[in-house]
Every structure is written in C-alpha cells, then in structure tokens.
Image: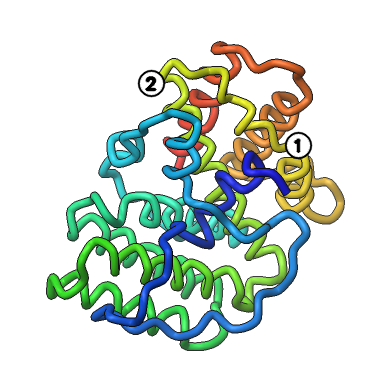
Amino acid sequence: MTRRLLLPLCLLSCTGEEKSPATSAVEVAPAGPVQPTALVPPPAQVQQALEQAGITADVQNIVGSRVIRATAESKDETAVRTGVLLAHVVLTVRTAPRAESQARLAAVRAGLVSLGVIGTAPLGSLDQLRAGLANDAVNESDRSIAMDHLSQIIVTQTYSAGPRTVPLLQAGGWLAGTQVVAAALLASGKIEAASLMKQPEVANYFLGFVQGEGQRADLPPVMAKVEATLRLLQALAEKSEISPEDVQQTQIMTGDLLSLL
C-alpha cells in the first residue's frame, strides 16, 4: 500500500506520533482488536507526508475555527459529519486553542451518542481528554498521543446505527483530509506532488457505502454532495497527470461540501 493511499485515511486513525512510555495525564482505554478493512491501512501522519513532499502546510489556518454540528436527521450524514469533526480535531489538536479542541470533542461525542456507539471506551476516553484540556493537564505531545488512541478506538467500535457507520465516519475524515491536502498543494505551488490525491480504490470503496443498497437516487443534499465529491476524486484518480486546475477544483468541491455541514 503506497503513501498516497495512506495520506488522508490517517485522519481517523493516527496522528503519526511515535509512542513514548506512558507519561500522559490522560489515560486512554485500549482500542481492542482492529477489524480488517482492505482499504483502511495503518495510517501515517498527514503533515509528515506533506513535509516529506516538501510541503509545509498551515493546517490550523486551512481547517479554520468553525466547529460544525455533528448530528443530523440522517444517521449516514451524522457519521460523515462526525468523521469530519474527528479529522479536524486530530489535525489541529496540537495547535488549536484548547477551547476550540474541547468544542470539537464535545461535538464528536454528540455524534457518537447519536450513532449509538456500543461500549464505554470511546466516550470515557473522550471525556477524559476533554477534562485534561479543560484543566490544562495535557501537553501538546500528549494531546496527539491521546487523540491517536481515541481515533483508533472510535473506528473499531460497533454502532447501533448499523455497519455503514464506520465506513462513513472514515469517508468524512478522508474528504476533510483531501481538502487539507488540496489547499496545501495550492498554497505551496508544488502541484507535482498531487499524485498524493490519486486514490481510486478509496473513492470507489466509499461510494458504495454512500449509495447503500439499491443505488438510491434520492440522497439527502449533504450525502448527494458527498457522492458528487467522491465521483470527482474517482475521475481525478483516472487522469495520467493532475493539473493545478484539478487541484483547485478539488479544493473548491471539498470546501463546498464542508460549508454545507
């Protein structure tokens, strides 16, 4: 599996921090056995991957300070929204104001509850991290480690909303990550690194879960936008060369999606 496949997927599983002996003020419950999914490999750090391509990204500025709402009438949309939120908090937990990270974690919690997370590990770990942030008891490095563990726990749980929940959580995170990558490529001018965005297998995989059984033609507006964005990325992956215009279109399309949330 290549790094270009790993890049945005890491948002829902890992910050890429090397694990040090447990000195964190926040103790996180173990994630438990990972359920194998062909297209969700062990992740790598987004910013590290960009830096290895010679790109320095101001992720905090790209993500912004807005904290989206996690819950929606549709459980599919709730999963996507929660995935976007989780990606944003993973990406910015070291640089965002503590109050902003706390607000995002509170929204993630609301999403998990709405999706019917089964088991106490995710909510307990999340609450512990929020308390640590509130008390200023967690340093930058420990925040990343704690978020790494928490995000792994979240995508290995069972949800009463159904088996589509985890893939749609991951789809939301992947699309949020793609928006960051596109913005970073444009800001740096290093369009030659756009091969990082060519991930046809991932787009195809997520499209199946967005449509669901029966290939619905009546998707709600947000889910319809998710589908359209995935189809754009699917088409992008088929190109032999990605142009600056392609990257700009990707940033606009993913940005438009996030603005609907």
Residue 93 percent across, percent down from the top left: 30, 56
Residue 174 percent across, percent down from the top left: 57, 46
Q: Residue furthest left?
A: 135
Taking the spot 55% from the left edge, 50% from the top edge, the residue there is 172
Does residue 173 appear anywhere in the picture?
A: yes
| Residue type beneath disc 1 | Pro
Q: Is residue 115 above or below residue 172?
A: below
**Which of the labelled discs sits on residue 27, or is there none?**
none
Q: Is residue 155 above or below residue 170?
A: below
Image quarter of residue 106: bottom left
If you read the primary sequence from the N terminus, does the residue marked by circle 1 or circle 2 appear first? Answer: 2
Q: Which residue is tagged 1?
A: 200
Between 95 and 111, the residue placed more toward the observer is: 95
User: Which quarter of the figure is the C terminus placed in?
Assistant: top left
Between 23 and 36, the residue placed more toward the observer is: 23
Q: Residue furthest right?
A: 214
Taking the spot 65% from the left edge, 17% from the top edge, the residue there is 242
| Residue type beneath disc 2 | Ala
Residue 194 percent across, percent down from the top left: 58, 25
Does residue 256 appear anywhere in the picture?
A: no
Left or right: residue 138 compared with residue 79: left
Left or right: residue 185 compared with residue 125: right
Label 1 to label 2: alpha-carbon separation = 24 Å
Q: How dense is the environment of label 2, judged by Cα within 10 Å: few (below 14), some, or many (20 and up)?
A: some
Q: Which residue is tagged 2?
A: 187
